[in-house]
Image (cartoon, rainbow, N blue to C red):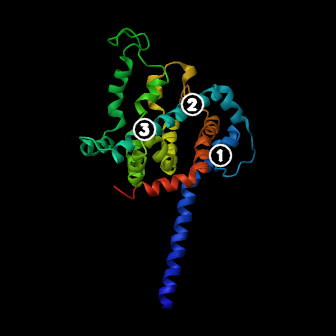
Amino acid sequence: MKITKTLNFVEKIFFTAFLICAGIVMFLPFYWSIITSLKPDSEIFSIPISWIPKTITLEHYYNAFTTVDFARFFINSFFLASFGVILNLFFGSLAGYSFAKLHFKGKDLAFKILPSSFMVPGIVTMIPQFLLLKNFPLAGGNNLLGQGGMGMLDSYWAILLPGAAGTFAVFLMRQFYQTLPDELGAAARIDGASEFAIFFRVYMPLTKPAMAALSIFTFQAGWNNFLWPMIVLSSPEKSTIQMALQAFSYNRSTDFGAMMAGSLVAILPMLILFICAQKHFVKGIAFTGMKT
């Protein structure tokens, strides 16, 4: 018995030590970004490496907001990410509710096909999406046949519409709606409630944990989106914060101090969102896998 307790104690020590080492390794890049943003240029590439800044300066943060219109790009990204969350919550919840609680022909087959889209890389669908947006009828100077103009390109709709109802959003919400009792909807139908009223007033308020998890995932994807906005947006004033970070690399050189300062500012919304919704996020991830 004593030998077993000793072995368990030793295992806990080694496991704790391993977790501490792994945590330090994972934290080092973030710490390096912080100290780089606070160092003067002369210390950033000093040899040997200075892990504690000898001189602390906020010059790089000033340069980050003055070199480019960083505040404007921050607002653009926040708008796109937030509006993307709203669209995904509504359409993802609506589709998830339909797959979980409604009965219609071909439902099972449609849901089996849905997860298969996870296997299609996003880069494969970029050209078809680009052509669809460019040839969208009666938009951006196009005629009824989708010719003559730029369609929805260089507009925020070109970013929002392709991801308005993501496959992951539908799958996540469907899994959560499956955990809710069918009797709630049956009772509401007896009282004469319409199907949309049942969805909006009965079931949707119960899905806050799943919606919190989906909000974090969707906001993170929208906030970190770089390639697609770079393809469809051509007006500088519509650029996102991720595109703005690219501006610190020019003439084959990079202003690492300003770039690190801008990167740290860019992650603040994600940190705040996760801290505020952490409890619901954990609940949402836990409940969505309980019933299939």
Quadrant including the C terminus: bottom left
The x and y percentages for residue 21 are 55, 63
Identity of the residue drawn at 40% across and 30% down: 162
Alpha-carbon span between mark 3 and mark 2: 28 Å
Identity of the amino acid at label 3?
A: Phe
129, above or below 276, in the image: above
Name the disc covering residue 219, or none: none
Q: Which mark is residue 34?
A: 1
The one nearer the camera, 238 or 146, is 146
* Residue 179, position as x, y percentages in the image: 40, 55
Q: Can residue 53 be seen here? A: yes
* Left or right of residue 257: residue 103: left
Which amino acid, mark 2? Phe
Disc 1 marks a residue whose amino acid type is: Ile
Q: Is residue 162 or residue 254 the one in the foreground?
A: 162
Of mark 1 and mark 3, the one earlier in the sequence is: 1
Circle 3 Cα neighbour tier, 10 Å, few/some/many (<14 / 14–19 / ≥20): few
In the image, residue 39 above or below residue 254: below
Q: Which SS class for mark 2?
A: helix
Quadrant hosting residue 255: top right
Q: 112 left or right of 209?
A: left
Q: In terms of image quadrants, where is residue 193?
A: top left
Q: Say what secondary structure mark 3 lies in.
A: helix
Which residue in the structure is indicated by mark 2? 79
**Residue 196: mark in rendering:** 3
Q: Nearer the viewer, residue 264 or 168?
A: 168
